[in-house]
Image (tube, rainbow, N blue to C red):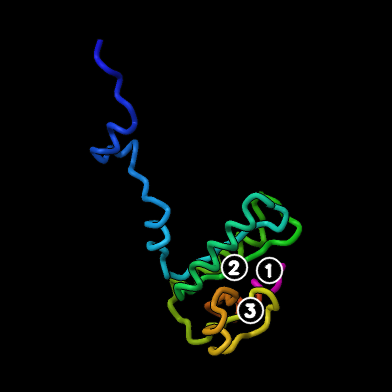
Amino acid sequence: MPRRPQPDDFQDRRHPRFPRRPLRHQQIQRVTTSPGIVACGEFDAERYGPSFACFQQGRRKDARWTWVSIGNVGHIRHKRFEESVRAYFASMLDGKFDQAQWLDAETKQPTTEDERLLNPALSAWLPTPEVADLWLKLHHP
């Protein structure tokens, strides 16, 4: 009787059903610096720490990312958050960032360039004043 194929057999051939996964140190090198949002509900204890660590890792690589800590929410969908995500990426498509703001993710206060250089992991990039207003209402440090 022939041997039954194993997932490792396909990985060596780059089979689409069993893609080869990069090692952890390879994933760290691939952090994108494209604008984006990393978010987690305040009561999602299992995912909150790793999500915030991912955000900090990207910010240390100078990614224009925004951290959103959604207050009084666990791991569920949130209407106001989804609306702010739509507004964020709509502003990305417009491509007008002349009024972009950097705010401190803990204090919600504007940051200076020197502060961002000293501690980049706590700065959130917001592409427009409208998106910043939505973030200020939603974000719960």
Binning the other alpha carbons within 10 Å of mark 1 as few (below 14), some (14 to 19) or many (20 upward) gives: some
The residue that disc 3 covers is: 104
Whole-percent x and y of residue 21?
37, 46
Q: Residue at x 30, y 19 (%)?
A: 4
- Disc 2 on helix, strand or loop? strand
Q: How far apart are the two marked residues, 2 and 1, measured between alpha carbons?
A: 8 Å
- Give yes or no for contact between labels 1 and 3 (Cβ–Cβ under 8 Å): no
Left or right, 51 with respect to 22, comes to right
- The 10 Å Cα crowd at callout 2, few under 14, some 14 to 19, many 20 or more, is many
Asked if the residue under mark 1 is in contact with the one under mark 2, i.e. CB atoms within 8 Å, the reply is yes
Is residue 139 a member of the stretch shown in magenta? yes
**Label 3 SS:** strand
Task: Calculate the distance from the C-alpha at mark 1 to the C-alpha at mark 3.
Answer: 11 Å
Q: Residue 42: which disc? A: none
Which residue carries the number 2 mark? 67
Asked if the magenta segment contains residue 80, the reply would be no
Three-letter code for the amino acid on which mark 2 is drawn: Trp
Task: Quadrant for the N terminus, please.
Answer: top left
Q: Residue at x 60, y 75 (%)?
A: 122
Between marks 1 and 3 in the image, the one whose residue lies nearer the viewer: 3
